[in-house]
Amino acid sequence: MADTEFDVVFIGAGPGGYVAAIRAAQLGLKVACIEKDNLGGVCLNVGCIPSKALLDASEHYYEAKTTFAKRGIKIDGTISVDLPTMMARKSDTVKSLVNGVGFLFKKNKIEHIKGSAKIVEAGKIEVAGADGSTRVVTGKNIVIATGSAPSIVPALPYDGKFILSSTEVLSLDAIPKRLLVVGGGYIGVEMSSVWSRLGSEVIVVEFLDRILPASDKEMGLALQKSLEKQGIKFRFNTAATGAKIEGDQVRVSFKNGETTGEEVVDKVLVSVGRRPITTGLNLEGVGVQTDKRGFVLVNEKFATNIPGIYAIGDVIGGIMLAHKAEEEGVAVAENLAGKHGHVNYHACPAVVYTHPELAAVGLTEADAAARGPIKVGKFNMIANGRAKGMEQTEGFIKVIADAKTDRILGVHIFAAHASDMIAEATLAMEFAASAEDLARAFHAHPTLPEALKEAAMAVNKNAIHA
């Protein structure tokens, strides 16, 4: 079966693919989107959204146990976790958002083609349906937006029951007594937070000497100390070397230098990075170039080496975040429609949704200093009136600026609601603002963002409340 030709066909309906499809349709292009699973990709179904639903629920439970009494809220009886209800709420949240994407596809007249895509040649895709049917889809342009999957560690093969990926750890039917997490990156520390708050004893094994090695060192270490106070244990400079299932437990072996050891746990989460999903696309057959790790190579317009074939999102590597894929999706759609889409990666924020949260945009202090003279302003949340009233005084904010021009080079926030506050810093960097610009802007009182204003003021040594 052959189709009428589309202007553009997107392969994958994650944050990159579905956003790109909608933007392309808004610009008047005839659009199809091929997706074998639910709309929304990893992010909506088994990533960003369900993980944040569990982080939110577990945080409320933890606060009820630890801070409610101090706030004058007394709870008679035992506070307990109803895990099935918590998981059902997570699933309902996911379903609602996935249905929302479906509504937007219909609204924008985007054809959702369900099945697995194989690029036969530029402009031609063969789609295999779950029922065994085959359909040929043709398009003037093809955009690969297939995303990524958890990286595989040969010594710790996933079985979905005892050795888990970031997908299975979101759907456990019981709280593990002991959980070992391999990898201290974003996913590792977020999932450690969820299950630690709910009652698990959590041990994180990290090959490097600290968590979040790509983050600003001072900020990452502050979060690390906070998580340790919350009960999470860390083993650094340590590699998990194997796992053996014994009954209902897992015996995990590890090595630290010349020292070896074992931990017996109920579950193991392996979160050591992500790999591009390209299986079945026939990239090699078509001639699309990839790097040695399998990421699709593209130019500044997201074009591959094959005319008419483009790629965006996790599948091209770089910053592997949903909002980065979204911006690339908008940019490639605008370029295909004859406009001038672009992405400013320097102003791409990143958030770790622990509690307190860690959010950042721009350069770390070390990277900024390596480029030339800088000045740094900091402000502690304990001196912020709103934080005091909320019992959320842990953390601080750091603003990094160029010593000569005062232009903001990076902002790092370790605080409650850091994910909300980083938006202002992102906008400031998008407009090439100076620390003085941020410091002179009105900030309502009392609010948490006043701390960001004070940190910006501190860059030039004129903070009021420090």
Image (cartoon, grey):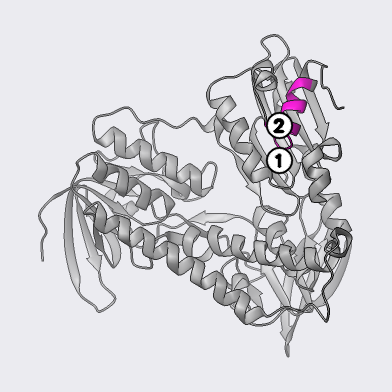
Span colored in magenta = 444-457
Q: Is residue 180 above or below residue 318?
A: below
In three-dimensional space, the C-alpha distance between marks 1 and 2, rounded to whole angstroms, equals: 7 Å
Q: Is residue 71 above or below residue 413?
A: below
Residue 236 visible to the viewer: no
Residue in the foreground of this view, choosing between 92 and 234: 92
**Residue reaching furthest to the top:** 404
User: Are there few (<14), some (14-19), or many (20+) residues within 10 Å of tag 1?
Assistant: some
- The secondary element bearing badge 1 is classed as loop
- The secondary element bearing badge 2 is classed as loop
Q: Which residue is mark 1?
A: 215
Whether the magenta-drawn stretch holds residue 462 is answered as: no
Name the residue: 67% across, 29% down.
443
Residue in the foreground of this view, choosing between 141 and 462: 462
Find residue 255 and report its horizontal and vertical position in percent: 82, 63
Find residue 323 and report its horizontal and vertical position in percent: 49, 45
Name the residue: 17% across, 66% down.
135
Mark 1 belongs to which amino acid? Ser
Find residue 54 and report its horizontal and vertical position in percent: 63, 66
